[in-house]
Image (cartoon, grey):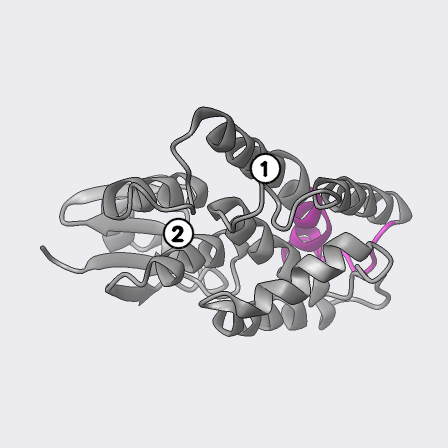
Amino acid sequence: MKDLVYYHFSPSPPSRGALLTIRNLNLPVEIKEINLFKKEQLNPEFLKINPQHCIPTIDDDGFVLWESRAISQYLVESRAPNSHLYPKEPKKRALVNQRLYFDLGTLYPRIRAICFPVLFLGETTISEEKTKQLYEAFNWLDGFLQSTKWVAGDEVTIADLSILASLASIVNVGADISKYHNLAKWYKMCETLPGFEENQKGAKVFGDAVKSKLTSGF
């Protein structure tokens, strides 16, 4: 079987989320960098692979898939179906899915609402309302961690990996998680995960790009 081909942009939170799954599964992979800042996703060669031109995208021996959380689910199911990263037991899996959807529908959109206008639309400040909405999401996430070690139970799952990629990005912009004690403890614990430092490097590039355009932050 050919190595998995992974179209990646390291500053992108979703792209780092699925890459964390690859690292935690210890999969052989060929990484092809697609620079979103230079709009390389619009190159004709990439559009033939993914007409929606989003990152990350995988090519698994001719099977092409995008959307980071779908990629993570597929990789566990196809490479390590008995892994605790995406448990089979219905209630455990449902909780992982709920946390993934929390990242997809709540946490990451609130991060993107802050960062996208700064990176691409000329905004130079972060509004009080956007900050309030972000910290509301942090509070919910802190609550998830009140009774469990990881965000969806007592074993690490792809929900942790997806949320870690999102959270690291906004922390590197300057968001403060210190008063959310469960969340801060979890974030520290994530340092033990394969790919953590690689994720941090990409998150720092992302954070520095946002901060370079801000006249005032959080």
User: Is residue 91 shown above or below 202?
Assistant: above
Who is closer to the viewer here, 13 or 196? 196
Q: Amino acid type of disc 2?
A: Pro
**What is the crowding at mark 2: few (fewer than 14 residues within 10 Å), some, or many (at least 20)?**
many
Q: Is residue 4 left or right of residue 202?
A: left
Marks 1/2: CA–CA distance: 20 Å
**Residues shaded magenta:** 110-127
- Residue, x 30% and y 65% (percent of image)? 32
Contact? badges 1 and 2 (CB < 8 Å): no
Residue 211: image location, x then y, percent:
73, 69
Residue 129: image location, x then y, percent:
87, 43
**Tag 1 secondary structure:** helix
Q: Is residue 205 left or right of residue 67?
A: right
Where the C terminus falls, by quadrant? Answer: bottom right
Q: Is residue 58 left or right of residue 183?
A: left
Q: Amino acid type of disc 1?
A: Arg
Would you say residue 112 sits in the magenta stretch?
yes
- Residue, x 12% and y 58% (percent of image)? 2
Where the N terminus falls, by quadrant? Answer: bottom left
Asked where in the image residue 102 lies, by quadrant, the reply is top right
Q: How many marks?
A: 2
Outermost residue, top direction?
Answer: 90
Who is closer to the viewer here, 158 or 137? 158
Asked where in the image residue 132 lies, by quadrant, the reply is top right
Would you say residue 24 sits in the magenta stretch?
no
Residue 143: image location, x then y, percent:
77, 41
Report whether residue 199 is seen: no
**Tag 2 secondary structure:** loop
Which residue has dot 2 on it? 56
Q: Residue 52, which numbered label?
A: none
Which residue has dot 1 on it? 99
